[in-house]
Amino acid sequence: MRNHFFYVSGRKNFAHHQVLTRVETDVKLACMTFSLGIVGAGQFAGAFAKLFDAHPAISEVHVTDVLPERAEALRARLGLAGTYPSFEAMLDGGLDAVAIFTQRWTHGPLVLQALRAGKHVYSAVPMAVTEDEIARIIDAVRETGLTYMMGETSYYNPATVYARKRKAEGAFGRIFYAEGDYVHDMDLGFYEAYQYSGGEDWKRTASYPPMLYPTHSTGGVLGAIGGHAVSVSCIGVPDDRGDGVFDKDVSMFGNDFSNATALFELSTGGSMRINEMRRVGYPSHLRESRFRYFGTDASFEQLATVSVWQDKESVTDVSAELATAATLGADDPALAGVAPALRDAFSSGLAAVHDAGRLPAEFRGLHNGHEGSHHFLVDDFATAVDTGTLPPVNAWEAARYTLPGIVAHESALRGGERLPVPDHGDAPARLSAGSGAEGPHREGPCGEGSEGEGFAGKARR
């Protein structure tokens, strides 16, 4: 790791992981920044690369892709430090961390390979696609002491943030039922996305089972109310479009479900229902993830354009607190590779309910996405690596968002049979450093900043 001197301020009321706690005055610290490699230069990576590069805890950003021209194009457009010819070369290249933005079913093996190579790992969702891969990732994190984080956007969805705050206040009473929907029709950008990532055989992968991509639904429920799934019964709906997508004879997954609904028993004594829909008459560009939480004292519900808080006496429209605005124009060059129907999701910014004060000053004016979540996800990962603490969506939490969908898909294949959902327990309070897991160290003065701004400066390379 490279020793750069930059300004760090105290943070207060940061409930999800331990950080600097002195808030009355700014603190001067000597800080180790870390280097990062981006794996996969597709549509999603481009939305995050600039943020990683701007974060004061990250000294340099490199990129690799199986199509070298894509890696070079991203490097050139954003002025990144360099490229690597392969993932293996990146792991051998002396970088401290990797951020994985590859196809959904590839994450598990790549994460394991990176952890075993001594790298901290940020991974796009899902965590993995099998129970075994998830168990092995948790074992690797425990053994190495390295940081693993899954970048679940719904954890910072404005509805999730709002519900998490109201739950902490006790306003719901006992939450006994919640719903999470990821309603994204294939016609609204997903055909183009799969064609971009899948090449000539894109229909083989476009049939990806909906319940193996559950975290935008489960993450918004469990990320607000806590607990974990205990059992599930799921119904899958076979597709009837007839265009070769969701065709068992074409699908590399042998899948013909385009929609699925699952009902879960929760460890808290309540229940959770999630919908994963890929053929649906719904404007997913307006709100692709939506949530409902029902408590004994109050409840919260969302539709495409409305969010309401309800108790036994009244209904309050809280839509304004959760509304986001675009941080890029639809024709911005940064969105050139993104299907028009997906551009709203890749540019939506902060809502009033977000705690913008905890973000690095360097993020001001930079594009955001997925209802303001991108800034927080990058900061969570950088902070966790820098401080040696667990991020909110750590390996144990990521497993609780991902495993329910894996088991739900199996339930659907069995005609809705109720199946138990495994759980790996709560995350430890702190990981012990293992082999290859030495984190940044702070020694002596390195700057100053303003309270509430998080990392407030960066020594640029």
Image (cartoon, rainbow, N blue to C red):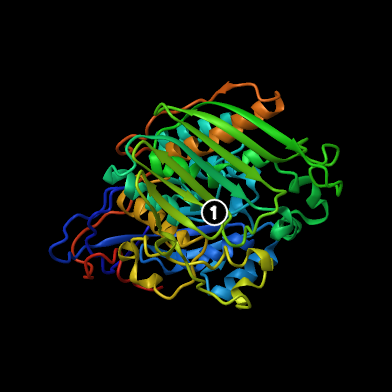
Secondary element type, mark 1 = loop
Q: Looking at this view, name the residue that lies furthest to the front.
A: 313
Left-right relation of 391 to 221: left
Q: Quadrant of the C terminus?
A: bottom left
Asked if residue 320 is positioned above or below residue 217 in the image, the reply reads below
Residue beneath label 1, please? 303
Left-right relation of 203 to 448: right
Asked if residue 443 is positioned above or below residue 399 in the image, the reply reads below
Q: Quadrant of the N terminus?
A: bottom left
Q: How many numbered markers are drawn?
A: 1
Could you say where residue 201 lies in the image, as x and y percent from the top left?
A: 82, 51
Could you say where residue 284 lies in the image, as x and y percent from the top left?
A: 62, 57
* Residue depicted at 69% across the width and 56% down the height: 66
Left-right relation of 163 to 235: left
* Residue depicted at 66% across the width and 38% down the height: 260
Under mark 1, the amino acid is Leu
* Residue depicted at 24% across the width and 54% down the height: 13
> In this view of the protein, can residue 96 be seen by the observer?
no
Left-right relation of 444 to 260: left
Q: Residues within 10 Å of mark 1 (few under 14, many from 20)?
A: few
Q: Nearer the viewer, residue 277 or 96?
A: 277
Asked if residue 353 is positioned above or below residue 264 in the image, the reply reads below
* Residue depicted at 57% across the width and 77% down the height: 329
Q: Nearer the viewer, residue 396 or 5?
A: 396
Q: Nearer the viewer, residue 333 or 6?
A: 333
Q: Looking at this view, name the residue that lies furthest to the left.
A: 24
Could you say where residue 392 lies in the image, as x and y percent from the top left?
A: 38, 46
> In this view of the protein, can residue 409 be seen by the observer?
yes
Could you say where residue 361 lies in the image, as x and y percent from the top left?
A: 34, 71
